Amino acid sequence: MSIEVKVPGLPESVSDATIVTWRKQPGETINRDESLVDLETDKVVLEVPSPIDGVVAEHHQAEGDVVMAGQLLATLNEVGVESSKENKPDETPERIITPSAKKMIAENKLNSDVITGSGKDGRVLKEDVQTFMQQVSLVDTLARRDAPTQFEVVEQKSIEAISEDSVQGDRIEKRVPMTRLRSRIAERLLDAQHNAAILTTFNEVNMQPVMDLRNKYKDLFAKKYDVKLGFMSFFVKATIEALKRFPAVNASIDGNDIVYHGYFDIGVAVASPRGLVVPVLRNADQMSLAEIESGIAELVDKARNNQLSIDDMTGGTFSLTNGGVFGSMLSTPIINPPQSGILGMHKIQQRAMVEDGEIVARPVMYLALSYDHRIIDGAEAVQFLVTIKDVLEDPARILVGV
């Protein structure tokens, strides 16, 4: 019996999707709920699972094609997986890759097919990925001795993507199309700059009180909640306190109306393998420090493994971005439309501060608030940032709510 696999229903804000990768080719067996094809939308990558145990009969669309909801993707023949294997005794069994190895492969954009597994039955371990990366690095170093201008190429597809016209002697260029997500990022950022009156105000915060509190309780916190006590939960709590005092920063513009949100859905900018994404921590004001840390860790893990859903990416009333993890000292973050503000966090560094007339060294972070001046006045923006500073420099305020 033949089964048709179609493009699943897409959210209202997503009109179409692009076929990124066929996970199974015609003639290959597939298990029920196993991924058949990856579809990329403007926001996330959707995995389309197989509805049956069977064999892939035919692809009706090619990689790179743009498809709509309900459009036919593939035809499957419904047969038992065991019987199909009996018909194909020479078929190589599917390789097993451990979760830690999968994560490392995704983070470094490697081709798992060329990595040799040393585990039981050829299982690919984390150590196998590390060994492969070391070998690639060595080969690259040796190659650069003879051809220092060559690109590092791990996958054969990268070589095939270079056309003959783009090679002139040792000067190589590679032209690749933007992914759907990268194109959408470019569109939204340009839209934000064109359609909002963006200004940025700055301040600095002495992180010593938060660091002292964190160092005092981090071991007990991790033991009790099974999650590390980081800085993000303090910043989310301080931000929510400031948003409550200055609701315009938590609002958005819809036509000629200002929409004031009575809830606090905080977006957290994450650098994923596919580009910048901003998953949302919903109802963050109702969360404890531990729930915030766990929620952010889950969203970051999803982003890095391309597992974010449309719901994870939808909405958000205000966002945070932490360039400090990459060493940024100061920046002017861009608003994530239709939001009206975004808080930029930066690297914590020892700096000279004056306390009680004495110059002392303190761990200081520069903060940046970019805001839409159409609905947020400068005085509100400055006081909003000062509120965050005050709460962080006296974190007991978080506990007593003052």
Image (cartoon, helix red, strand yellow):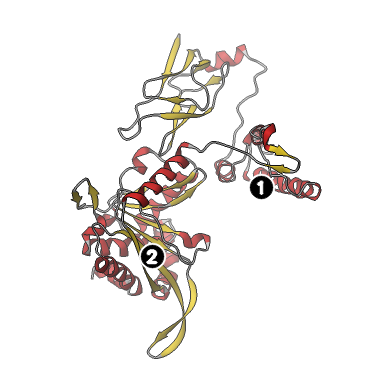
The residue mark sitting in front, 1 or 2, is 2
Q: Residue at x 46, y 85 (%)?
A: 360
- Give the quarter of the image for residue 216: bottom left
Q: Nearer the viewer, residue 302 or 179?
A: 179
Q: Residue at x 20, y 50 (%)?
A: 259
Q: CA distance from mark 1 to mark 2?
A: 38 Å
Upstream in the sequence, badge 1 or badge 2? Answer: 1
- Tell me if mark 1 has few (under 14), some (14-19) or many (20+) residues whose alpha carbon lies within 10 angstroms of its own: some
**Secondary structure category for the residue under label 1:** helix
Q: To which residue does mark 1 refer?
A: 130
- Give the quarter of the image for residue 173: top right
Residue 117 in view: no
Q: Nearer the viewer, residue 284 or 84?
A: 284
Report the quarter where the C terminus lies. bottom left
Q: Position of residue 234 (x, y in %)?
A: 36, 64
**Secondary structure category for the residue under label 2:** strand
**185 above or below 54?**
below
Q: Position of residue 52 (x, y in %)?
A: 45, 19
Q: Residue furthest top?
A: 1
Q: Position of residue 183 (x, y in %)?
A: 45, 40
- Tell me if mark 2 has few (under 14), some (14-19) or many (20+) residues whose alpha carbon lies within 10 angstroms of its own: many
Q: Residue furthest bottom?
A: 357
Q: To which residue does mark 2 refer?
A: 368
Which amino acid lies under the numbered mark 2 shown in the image of this protein?
Ala
Q: Nearer the viewer, residue 286 or 308?
A: 308
Q: Residue at x 21, y 45 (%)?
A: 255
Which amino acid lies under the numbered mark 1 shown in the image of this protein?
Gln
Q: Are marks 1 and 2 in contact (CB under 8 Å)?
A: no
Q: Position of residue 186 (x, y in %)?
A: 44, 45
Q: Nearer the viewer, residue 273 or 377?
A: 377
Residue 296 in view: yes
